């Protein structure tokens, strides 16, 4: 039964084990609603803004970009298993702002994301990204707790 409420669902992922639960929720909602999924991974430009542009920076940038590709592949694979169409994008900028901007520009009906990222500082930062998205988005946001 196709949902009139959810036609496009955005899943924001950082590739961590904790956000995989959010991916599962988003894919299942999309399957039930017969919605399309947009999956995004945001490369945090702020993390690179103060670094010198040298070979080490390029290497780190490419490593993180590859990590984003793997995170998106996981969403795509889960979508394929469930018969859900997934469009993937790697974005660059401030994560919360980029997620909300993407959702607005693509007329997304629901944003799905996790609260906990990787570990330590990453966990705090991802938690703050989720908080910022909730507070700045006019689009409904489903926060899925990890663990």
Image (cartoon, grey):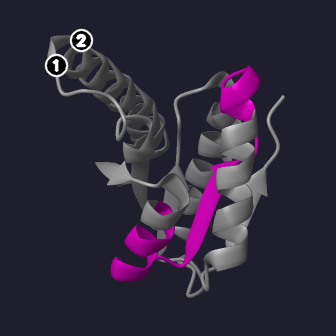
Q: Point out residue 49 in the picture as x, y percentages from the top left corner.
A: 35, 41
Q: Which mark is residue 128?
A: none
Residue marked by disc 1: 54
What residue lies at 79% left-to-right and 35% top-to-bottom?
146
What span is colored magenta in the figure? 99-123
Residue appearing at x 36%, y 35% in the figure? 48
Query: How many marks overall?
Result: 2
Out of 22 and 52, give the one closest to the viewer.
Answer: 52
Badge 1 element? loop
The quadrant holding residue 69 is top left
Q: Nearer the viewer, residue 93 or 41?
A: 93
Across and down, in percent, residue 61 comes to 28, 25
| Rendered image quadrant of residue 70 | top left
Contact? badges 2 and 1 (CB < 8 Å): yes
Where does residue 128 sit, x and y in percent of width and height? 72, 51
Judged from the image, the secondary structure of the residue bearing numbered disc 2 is helix
Look at the picture and state if 125 lies above or below 68.
below
Q: Is residue 87 visible?
A: no
| Image quadrant in which the N terminus is located | bottom right
Instruction: Tell me, yes or no, whether the highlighted magenta stretch contains residue 92.
Output: no
Closer to the camera in the image, 62 or 12: 62
**How packed is label 1: few (under 14 Cα within 10 Å), some, or many (20 or more)?**
few
> Going by the image, does 93 lie left or right of 100?
left
Residue 145 visible in image:
yes
* Residue at x 32%, y 51% (from the top left corner): 91
Tag 2 residue? 56
Q: Position of residue 33 (x, y in %)?
A: 57, 69
């Amino acid at each position: 039964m196709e949902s009139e409420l959810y036609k496009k669902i955005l899943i924001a992922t950082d590739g961590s084990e904790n956000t995989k639960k959010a991916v599962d929720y988003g894919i299942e909602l999309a399957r039930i609603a017969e919605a399309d999924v947009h999956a995004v991974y945001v490369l945090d430009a702020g993390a690179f803004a103060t670094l010198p542009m040298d070979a080490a920076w390029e290497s780190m940038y490419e490593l993180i970009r590859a990590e984003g590709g793997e995170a998106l592949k996981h969403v795509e694979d889960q979508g394929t298993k469930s018969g859900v169409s997934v469009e993937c994008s790697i974005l660059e900028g401030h994560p919360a702002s980029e997620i909300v901007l993407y959702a607005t520009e693509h007329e997304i009906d629901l944003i799905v994301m996790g609260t906990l990222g990787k570990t330590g500082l990453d966990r705090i930062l991802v938690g703050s990204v989720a908080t910022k998205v909730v507070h700045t988005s006019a689009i409904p946001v489903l926060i899925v707790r990890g663990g």
